[in-house]
Image (cartoon, rainbow, N blue to C red):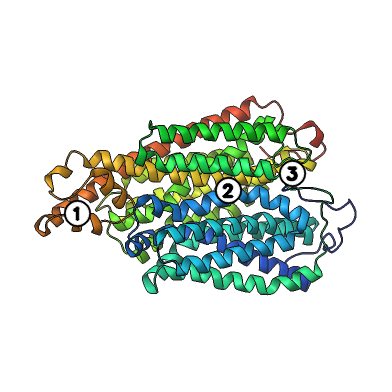
């Protein structure tokens, strides 16, 4: 299986693996320490890029004169490629070696980030970001597999705890770091810094490769057809969502893309059922509790990741903050992401049900998104501080629990596959949620503008103006009208953006509530939290 992790026999470590009990903390070997630091540095770069790029979008749009759709793909291209290639990289790592696959991914990411920093137009930037997403998928899937090889026993648990913590910190400081870079030295340095960090990673890899012995699947082949069909389905679906506001949701083009998505998924399912080593064993999805836990990150994608991506644009366009200040304000949203996982772990250790905490996290997403409607043009920051913290807690409380709870449910020999599906659903839903938000924003903005834009001669078509405003660019549309009317027209654009933002917040609240209800129903109707073959393991908490 593509993302399956080999486990050493009971009572002994795999070749080149630390003996059980050795720790990544004091007492770890130099090889273990170097490996851990290298993986964590690469892992830190990926979520920093995911959360921080949105802060740079207004400056990227202004510098490259990009319209909404190609500007959206600066974010979407990375997310879609990341989600599409996670399972494929796991399969490649099992065949050519995890360190080598990790190195290939880090190299692709470094080159793509350099290309992003040097891009002369938004199309080149979109392509470079897609390549970075492919590399990022390798860093996450192969990085965790390397830690599984190098560490064993309690030390493995500590290593993975650090893996998750560093990822959360990357998400947390990404907007602030990017905002500071954009304001201080320009948006290109957001990507140049990634290149420098991954250059350090690549320098350390030869030493790690020489000292790491890892098992490989002899005779296994990459599920090329399954991978192509899955990637095709994701591309068709995301393109349909992004283009919905441009072509019309009922247009032949959009409906054809949705139909193509269904066909590709059907073919993917048929192919996987006939594979000896499928990319995804569909029988894993028969467990209702496992499927419920996999939907928790989907709720977080709609309730939290959309805000992480587009709230900075709202803060600059409507509230009038600079990019740097908007990044600092975003700390209120991201701080709980790396504080709450440790809090949740301590609560579980003290006897609180993990499932209860997951339900609380879902409730935070619903309440947080609903109360973010307090945002307005002149609202005091203190009035929205609590809603931002609550929304962040909705992401943070579940982030440290879902993976462990989900993997406890399935049989041990299917753990790698289950982890791959969970991460694919997590990353895929992020890409889709961000695409839906951007498309809805442009659609709702255009509808808000239709009634009043005629009062400003020369303003242009509402859909065209909406595309630019949705990308955070107020200056371009305002310059199209007479100088004497620019102040009033800018106020009109700001009011329209603010109204559309509030409408979409209620849509996101509804989506999170529906997912909450579905997750609860799946948990209740699941007759058993574990597959029969895995009955000997520790029971899932909650």
- The answer to which quarter of the image holds residue 110 is bottom right
Question: Residue pushed farthest left?
Answer: 484
Look at discs 3 and 1 and give the one toward the viewer. 1
The answer to whether residue 284 is visible is no
Q: Locate the C terminus and report the quarter of the image it occupies.
A: top right
First of labels 3, 1 by sequence position: 3
Position of residue 298 relative to residue 483, above or below, is above
Position of residue 146 relative to residue 207, above or below, is above
Q: Is residue 492 left or right of residue 261?
A: left
Residue 382 screen position, x and y as percent:
33, 55
Residue holding disc 3: 415
The answer to whether residue 182 is visible is yes
Label 2 – label 3 distance at C-alpha? 19 Å
In percent of the image, x 67 and y 68: which residue is there? Answer: 38
First of labels 2, 3 by sequence position: 2
Quick check: marks 3 and 1 in contact, CB under 8 Å? Answer: no
Label 2 – label 1 distance at C-alpha? 38 Å
Look at discs 2 and 3 and give the one toward the viewer. 2
- The answer to which quarter of the image holds residue 233 is top right
At mark 3, the secondary structure is helix
Label disc, if present, on residue 157 of the rendered structure:
none
Q: Locate the N terminus and report the quarter of the image it occupies.
A: top right
Residue holding disc 2: 83
At mark 2, the secondary structure is helix
Position of residue 70 relative to residue 16, above or below, is above
Q: Residues within 10 Å of mark 3 (few under 14, many from 20)?
A: many
Q: Residues within 10 Å of mark 2 (few under 14, many from 20)?
A: many
At mark 1, the secondary structure is helix
Residue holding disc 1: 490
In percent of the image, x 69 and y 29: which residue is there? Answer: 286
First of labels 2, 1 by sequence position: 2
Q: Residues within 10 Å of mark 1 (few under 14, many from 20)?
A: some
């Amino acid at each position: 299986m593509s993302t399956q992790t080999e486990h050493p026999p009971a009572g002994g470590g795999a070749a080149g693996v630390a003996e059980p009990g050795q720790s990544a903390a004091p007492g770890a070997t130099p090889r273990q320490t170097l490996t851990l630091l290298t993986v964590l540095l690469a892992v830190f770069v990926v979520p920093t890029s995911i959360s921080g790029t949105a802060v740079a979008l207004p400056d990227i749009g202004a510098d490259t004169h990009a319209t909404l759709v190609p500007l959206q793909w600066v974010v979407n291209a990375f997310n879609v490629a990341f989600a599409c290639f996670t399972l494929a990289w796991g399969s490649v790592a099992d065949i050519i070696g995890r360190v080598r696959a990790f190195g290939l991914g880090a190299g692709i990411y470094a080159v793509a980030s350099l290309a992003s920093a040097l891009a002369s137009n938004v199309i080149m930037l979109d392509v470079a970001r897609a390549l970075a997403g492919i590399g990022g998928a390798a860093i996450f899937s192969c990085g965790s597999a390397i830690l599984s090889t190098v560490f064993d026993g309690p030390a493995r648990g500590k290593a993975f705890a650090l893996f998750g913590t560093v990822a959360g910190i990357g998400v947390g400081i990404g907007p602030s770091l990017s905002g500071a870079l954009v304001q201080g030295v320009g948006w290109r340095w957001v990507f140049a810094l990634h290149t420098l960090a991954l250059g350090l990673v690549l320098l350390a890899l030869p030493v790690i490769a020489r000292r790491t012995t890892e098992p490989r699947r002899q005779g296994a082949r990459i599920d090329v057809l399954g991978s192509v069909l899955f990637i095709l389905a994701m591309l068709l679906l995301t393109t349909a969502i992004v283009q919905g506001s441009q072509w019309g949701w009922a247009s032949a083009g959009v409906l054809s893309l949705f139909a193509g998505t269904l066909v590709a998924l059907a073919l993917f399912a048929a192919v996987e059922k006939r594979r000896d080593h499928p990319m995804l064993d569909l029988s894993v999805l028969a467990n209702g509790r496992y499927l419920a836990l996999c939907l928790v990150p989907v709720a977080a994608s709609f309730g939290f990741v959309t805000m992480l991506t587009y709230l900075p644009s709202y803060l600059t366009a409507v509230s009038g903050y600079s990019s740097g200040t908007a990044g600092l304000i975003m700390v209120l949203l991201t701080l709980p992401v790396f504080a709450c996982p440790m809090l949740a772990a301590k609560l579980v250790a003290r006897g609180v049900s993990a499932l209860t905490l997951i339900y609380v996290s879902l409730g935070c997403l619903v309440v947080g998104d609903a109360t973010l409607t307090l945002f307005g043009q002149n609202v005091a920051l203190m009035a929205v501080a609590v809603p931002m913290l609550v929304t962040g807690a909705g992401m943070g409380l579940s982030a440290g629990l879902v993976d462990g709870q989900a993997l406890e449910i399935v049989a041990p020999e299917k753990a790698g596959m289950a982890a791959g599906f969970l991460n694919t659903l997590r990353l895929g839903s992020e890409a889709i949620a961000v695409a839906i938000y951007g498309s809805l924003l442009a659609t709702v903005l255009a509808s808000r503008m239709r009634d009043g834009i005629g009062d400003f001669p020369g303003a242009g078509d509402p859909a065209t103006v909406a595309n630019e405003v949705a990308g955070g660019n107020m200056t371009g549309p305002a310059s199209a009208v007479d100088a004497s009317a620019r102040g009033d027209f800018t106020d009109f654009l700001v009011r329209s953006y603010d109204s559309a933002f509030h409408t979409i917040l209620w849509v996101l609240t509804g989506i999170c509530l529906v997912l909450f209800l579905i997750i609860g129903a799946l948990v209740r109707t699941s007759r058993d939290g574990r597959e029969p073959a895995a009955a000997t393991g520790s029971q899932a908490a909650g």
